[in-house]
Image (spheres, coloured by chain):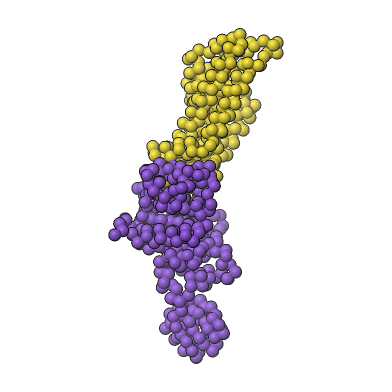
Amino acid sequence: MKQLIRSELRKLTTTNMPWAFLGALFAIAAINAFAVIAATDFDGSKTFISTEVDQQSLVAFAANGFVLASLFGAIAVAREYGHHTVVPTFLAAPRRHRAVLAQVSAVAVGGAILSMVGAGLTVSAVAISLPTTEYGFLISAGHVVQIVAASAFAGAAGAVVRNVGGAVTGVVLMLIVAPPLIVQLANSTASWMPNSLALVLAGVTTDVSGPAAVAALSAWALVPAGIGLVAVQRRDVI
Amino acid sequence: MATTMPTYQLEVTHLTKSYGDATVVDDLTFTVPPGRVTGFLGPNGSGKSTTLKIMLGLASPTTGHATISGHRYKDLANPAQTVGAIIESDAFHPGRSGRNHLRILADATGCSYTRVDEMLDEVGLGSAANRRAGAYSLGMRQRLGLAAAMLGEPPVLILDEPGNGLDPQGIHTLRDVLRGHAARGGTVLVSSHLLAEVEHLADDVIVINDGRLVAHGALAELQNSAALVRTTDPGLLATQLEQAGALTESQGTDGLVVRGMSLTEIGERAFASGFVLHELSSHAGSLEQLFLSWTGATPDDRDHTS
């Protein structure tokens, strides 16, 4: 299994794709810095960065890493099928659950690293740009760590949700389309949607408890992963 | 003296694969012995690739089974170091270098990076190893595929159209590699539409048409299994022999090439029907002629065989 995971990690690091995502994360960090330096509230003040909670909310923009990590994983696996590299993968690991678990593990690690880098860049960008304003950097070190860790978890979970290949394309579509529809039908479920749960983990909101958020976000990841794992066993590689 | 390797026999038994109402592989049974190169032939869409995919666990049979010395591919202790395969000629990420492509496979199969570099040199890609595989020519891609198939030093090779896009030197190298592999006791199954190449390469051939086995055996024996008959009324004799189960093909104005019937039986049937025979002899046909008679293809179809 270790060999397969190493192989999958090498797949992720031997194309230009990670650099493209890193570029996107730099852009997000730059937007944050620009907002701190140039943006104002309607009254011309900068109250949107005046408290720790405000700054936390701004930095939580790094939760975009969640989306990016999901895209990272989705593209990585879609390419696996599109370029037929899944053929040598399944030849090396004909018991496909091992190949899929290795793939999911690798993209989870990749997504987590990507999210952590994104969160780190955003926090750094805000910290560096705040001195240009009248406000200091108010986010405590503990909260910074929490944001980074939450981004990592969300990134990993997001990557897993979308990373069991073409077998779960339908499920992925359901995950993207379903949350807003569910919230429209039952407003009380809003707290249990992936983005809301990520914000809880980042300490921005407290809609649900931390452990509940971890459990719910894990479920969002693992249910479709399990469906994909079963589906890929039966599929002919044509 | 060349080192030998463990021997494996491939067995396909009553294999059938259907997609809905379409039967792609129909009750196929054959064996591929070690120590020989076996050519796997058939027209486009005859079920060759599907059969190979089932043998490699990439597709599931509807009925029947395919085994490697009694084991399904997925039950082999170390499949990638037992069987090397080329199934898709472009099974690589175009943005990844040839060396990294092989290193990924080496990671997955437990091979060393030294072996990666050895294989790159062996297939002549050493100088292009760090170039993006997407920029490789078709021939270079095939050589990368061959390097991938042989990375784990497997005793069994299952190769789908490995000669596609290779230049004459590449074909020559491929032939040497596969002949050498079989000489060391390896099992080689090669699907190809290059009939002349198969004629030079294969010891045995398996020919399928519409998913069914139409010929299987030693190529030399199959090539000599035909008879040439010269008679005053070849058309009438052909009709009678075909009714008895033979395949016939006219040869000139008075000749007839007959397959699927022994010289003795042809002579006896001709004598019983009162035909005057001017010649009855063994006839060695080219693989192309045999292929066309087995598959019922016309010469115009030759370019479309695979």
Residue B173 image-quadrant placement: bottom left
Give the residue at the far front of this rendering: B127
Q: Residue at x 56, y 85 (%)?
A: B253
Q: Residue at x 60, y 32 (%)?
A: A176
Q: Is residue B269 placed above or below A136 in the rendered structure?
A: below
Task: Give the quarter of the figure containing the N terminus of chain A.
Answer: top left
Q: Nearer the viewer, residue B237 or A118?
A: A118
Q: Is residue A126 placed above or below B187 in the rendered structure?
A: above
Tell me residue B53's x, y (percent): 47, 53
Tell me residue A126's x, y (percent): 57, 17
The answer to whether residue B32 shows anywhere in this view is no
Q: Residue at x 42, y 37 (%)?
A: A5
Residue B111 image-quadrant placement: top left
Tell me residue B244's x, y (percent): 49, 79
The answer to whether residue A152 shows anywhere in this view is yes
| Chain B visual colour | purple
Q: Is residue B12 placed above or below A141 in the rendered structure?
A: below
Specify whether B85 is left or right of B22. left
Give the residue at the far left of this rendering: B1
Instruction: State the yellow chain.
Output: A
Residue B174 image-quadrant placement: bottom left
Give the residue at the far right of this rendering: A43
Specify whether B154 is left or right of B40. left
Q: Nearer the viewer, residue A202 or A83?
A: A83
Tell me residue A80's x, y (percent): 51, 42
